């Protein structure tokens, strides 16, 4: 089994493609749009200190370049995970869980780069994600979380 350090670099195929598409959009469409806006703002001959719009566009350009570099770095460091065995919870799997006495929640086990509780993305390096990896539907596990011990039931996989 892989270590947590190795798992931290894993990403789902879907997550990789999403980041790759964002990078492509930023380096083509968005970068061109910002360059056009900067050219138009500079055509009036003013300097950034004299033109708040130009200064704002320069800030936008810097933020865009930072995000592009962040995406390039992330994409160079991640490895697309192999799909887990059929019926076994693993990275990329859509699952349904119940935490404590709560209702069922649909989630997806993902790498840390993709984790987003608002959309149901549970990182495989989080306490709950680590506990779920390798389980099958119907299994229950106790998980030590920052909020205390939680009983998590894996209702379904896939």
Image: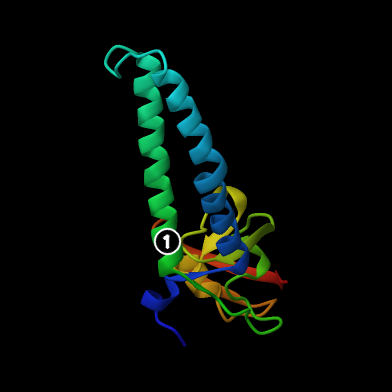
40 lies left or right of 93: left
Q: Which quarter of the picture shows residue 97?
A: bottom right
Q: Which residue is drawn at 55% across and 52% down?
A: 24
Looking at the image, the residue that sits furthest to the bottom is 1
Q: Where is residue 6 in the image (x, y as percent from the top left)?
A: 40, 77
Residue 34, relative to residue 13: is it above or below?
above
Q: Is residue 154 left or right of residue 31?
A: right
The reply to whether residue 27 is in sight is yes
Q: Dot 1 surroundings within 10 Å: few (below 14), some, or many (20 or more)?
A: some
Q: Whole-percent x and y of residue 76?
A: 42, 67
| Number of numbered discs visible in the structure rendering | 1
Name of the residue lying farthest toward the left: 49
Q: In this view, does 151 lie above or below 52?
A: below
Which residue matches tag 1? 74
Indicate left or right for 146 with 138 as reference.
left
- Residue at 35% x, 37% y is 62
- Closer to the camera in the image, 23 or 88: 23
Asked where in the image residue 81 lies, by quadrant, the reply is: bottom right
Secondary structure of the residue carrying numbered label 1: helix
Residue 109, percent from left and from top? 58, 66
Q: Can residue 126 be seen in this view?
A: no
Instruction: Determine whether 119 is above or below 122 in the image.
Output: above
User: Where is residue 59, by image quadrant?
Assistant: top left
Q: In which quarter of the image is the C terminus?
A: bottom right
Name which residue lies at 56% across and 63% down.
16
């Amino acid at each position: 089994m892989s270590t947590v350090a190795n798992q931290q670099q894993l990403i789902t195929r879907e997550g990789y493609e999403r980041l790759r598409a964002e990078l492509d959009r930023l380096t083509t469409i968005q970068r061109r749009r910002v360059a056009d806006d900067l050219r138009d703002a500079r055509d009036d001959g003013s300097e950034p200190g004299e033109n708040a719009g130009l200064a704002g566009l320069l800030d936008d350009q810097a933020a865009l370049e930072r995000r592009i570099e962040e995406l390039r770095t992330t994409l160079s460091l991640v490895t697309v995970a192999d799909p887990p065995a059929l019926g076994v919870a693993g990275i990329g799997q859509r699952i349904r869980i119940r935490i404590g006495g709560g209702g069922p929640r649909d989630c997806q086990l993902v790498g840390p780069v993709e984790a987003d509780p608002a959309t149901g993305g549970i990182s495989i390096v989080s306490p709950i994600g680590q506990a779920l990896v390798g389980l099958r539907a119907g299994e229950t596990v106790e998980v030590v979380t920052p909020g205390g011990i939680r009983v998590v039931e894996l209702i379904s996989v896939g």
